[in-house]
Amino acid sequence: MGKNEQAYACEAFSMNWLSTVGPNLTAFERDFSERIGQPAVCLASGTAGIHLGLQLLGVGPGDEVFCSTLTFAASANPILYLGATPVFIDSDCATWNMDPAVLERAMRERAAAGKLPAAVVVVDLYGQCADLEPILEICNRYGVPVLEDAAEALGATYKGRSAGTFGHISVFSFNGNKIITTAGGGMLVSPDAAVVEKARFLATQARDPGVAYEHSQVGYNYRMSNVLAGIGRGQLEVLEERVNQRRGVFAKYEQAFAGVAGLEPMPEASFGRSSRWLSCVLVEPQQFGCDRAELMAFLDAAGIESRPVWKPMHLQALYTGAPVYGGEVAADLFHRGICLPSSSSLTDDEVNYVAEKVLAAPRNIGREVLTHA
C-alpha cells in the first residue's frame, strides 16, 4: 500500500458510502480514464469485464472466439459463459503472446470455411503487450472486433501508448496479486463512451431508468464497491513507482543470471516497455543441470515460493477437444518456464537470496542424487 489508500477507504466509512456507488468510484473511474485516455467503468473483477466485453461485442451461443492459449483461465472462461467456443492461438517466442502469423493462418482458414470468429481475445502476458499492430491489422481486415485482456499489463506500453487502449474493448484486473490492487476488482475501458455506459448498465443488474425496479434484459451484480475504489485511487497514485519496482526486481535477476547457460529471462520486446508484473525465466535442463520442476522443489525447500508459467488453455482438461492453432510454443514455455518472487516490496537481500538459490540448485540437486544412489 501507498500513503493514501487507507485515507480514501476510511473516507468511504466516514461518509457511509459503502455500496456500489459513491465518491471513490466516481473519482477512481475519472482518474483511471485520464491516465489511460479512454472512458472507464469499475467492475468487481477483470473476469467480469471480459464477460461483459464479449457480450457487448456480440458474442453468443454457437459463435467461435479466438483466444491466446498461454494465459490464465479467466481469459477464456467467459467465452463459455456466453455459450461460445474458444479457438486457441499459439504464442511467439519473442513476446510469449499471441503469434500474429498463427492468427493470420487461423483467420484465413476460418474465413475460407465461412466461420469467422465473433471476436479475438488477445492477452498482454506477464506485463508485456502482444505485438498489437499486426494483430489489429489482421482483425480489421477480416472485420473481427478485438478485446484486449490487459489484466496483467497495467503500466506497460506498446509503441509509446498504454497497454489496454488497443481493443474495441479492453479490460484490466486489480486482483490481490496485480501490480496495483483493490483487493478484488477490475476496469473495462473503450474508446466508445456508449459501450462503457452500456457496460455500467449491465453491471448494475440492468435496472431500467426510473424509480421502480424495472428490468427489460438480464444484468449482473458486477460493480466494485466504493470502499475498494478508495484503495484503487491510492494505488493508482503509485502505479509508476510499482512498475519501476517490478522492473528493478527483474533487472536484478537478469543481472544475476547473465551468462548462465540454461537460464533465459523472459525477453522484453523492442516495441514497448513491460511492467514486469512477474519475473519469469526459462530453464533448459540439459544446459542448466536441472529441470523446472526440480528447481521449484529446491526453491520450496529453501522457503521460496515459485510457480510454473501458465498452463496453456489447450492443455487444460476443461478445454479438451477445443480447436487450437499451433500450441507447441506455448507448451514449451509452460514446461520450461518458472515465475520467481516478484513483489514490489521485495528487498535487495531477498532478491539476492532467491537468485543465489536458483544458481545453487543444479549442484545441490546433483549431490542429492549421488547421495541417494
Image: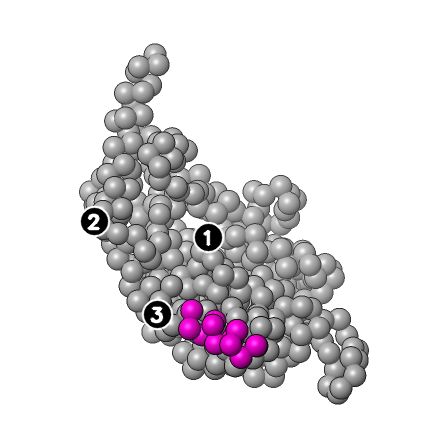
Number of callouts: 3
- Distance between the alpha carbons at the discs numbered 2 and 3: 31 Å
Closest to the observer: 237 or 269?
Answer: 237
Q: Which residue is mark 2?
A: 255
At 27% from the left edge and 26% from the top edge, which residue is drawn?
Answer: 364
Residue 159: x and y in percent read: 35, 71
- Distance between the alpha carbons at the discs numbered 3 and 1: 39 Å
Amino acid of disc 2? Gln
Q: Which residue is mark 3?
A: 3
Main SS type for the magenta part?
Answer: helix
Residue 265 left/right relative to 324: left
Quadrant of image for the N terminus: bottom left
In magenta, the rendered stretch is 6-16
Q: Nearer the viewer, mark 2 or mark 3?
A: 3
> Which SS class for mark 2?
helix
Amino acid of disc 3? Lys
Q: Which residue is mark 1?
A: 91
Residue 121: x and y in percent read: 55, 62
